[in-house]
Amino acid sequence: MKYLALFEFVPGEEGFSVLFPDIPFGWTTGRNFDEAYKRAVEVLDIKLSDMEIEGQEIPSPRTLEQIQKEWEDWAEWEKDGNFLIVPVPYIPAAKPAKYSIYMDKSLMARIDEVTDNRSAFLSKAAEMLLDYHPAR
């Protein structure tokens, strides 16, 4: 699922503010676009995970057209016109699944030197790399 986020750069202020029209209290900031995007991904995950834990209904992502029609603050945002609309992915946490991968033996040996849990190590490495290079 992807939720639309409004990234606003306010002249005279540092960085970006980010707002999710579909998520109650879903907002964050960042000193630059990359930091704001990374924080937006984190906030979306935290807010929706918390809602799920608390038994609240997870809102469906709306299209831009729906947000323009239904969101009460749209007219104010549109009037200012100083924002970007960016889809931000939400991937709900799932139970671990087993996968077979092919990897160079020497690389696996290096991994084994630093961890007793290959799966956790590779999952964390993949997560860090994906955070460093967000989806394009």
Image: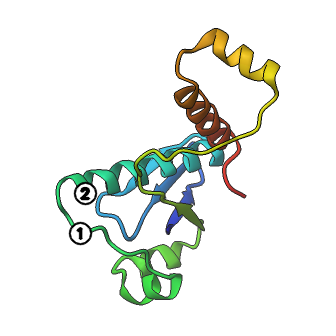
Mark 2 lies on residue: 51
**In percent of the image, x 81 and y 18: which residue is there?**
106
Q: Looking at the picture, tell me which residue is in the foreground, 43 or 78.
A: 43
**In percent of the image, x 68 and y 55: which residue is there?**
135
Badge number at residue 130: none
Mark 1 lies on residue: 57
- Counting labels gives 2
Q: Looking at the picture, tell me which residue is in the foreground, 89 or 66.
A: 89
Verify CB contact (< 8 Å) between mark 1 and mark 2. Answer: yes
> Residue 119's spot in the image, x, y percent?
55, 31
Indicate which disc, 1 or 2, sits on the residue closer to the N terminus: 2
**In percent of the image, x 44 and y 79: which residue is there?**
62
Q: Is residue 88 above or below residue 110?
A: below
Helix or strand or loop: what does disc 2 sit on? helix
Is residue 133 toward the left or the right of residue 73 in the image?
right
Q: How many neighbours does mark 1 have within 10 angstroms: few (below 14), some (14-19), or many (20 or more)?
A: few
Helix or strand or loop: what does disc 1 sit on? loop
> Residue 38's spot in the image, x, y percent?
56, 45
Q: Looking at the picture, tell me which residue is in the foreground, 59 or 108.
A: 108
The quadrant of the rendering that contains the C terminus is bottom right
Q: Is residue 122 above or below residue 97?
A: above
User: Spatial distance from mark 1 to mark 2, Cα to Cα?
Assistant: 7 Å
Q: Amino acid at mark 2?
A: Met
Quadrant of the image occupied by residue 22: bottom left
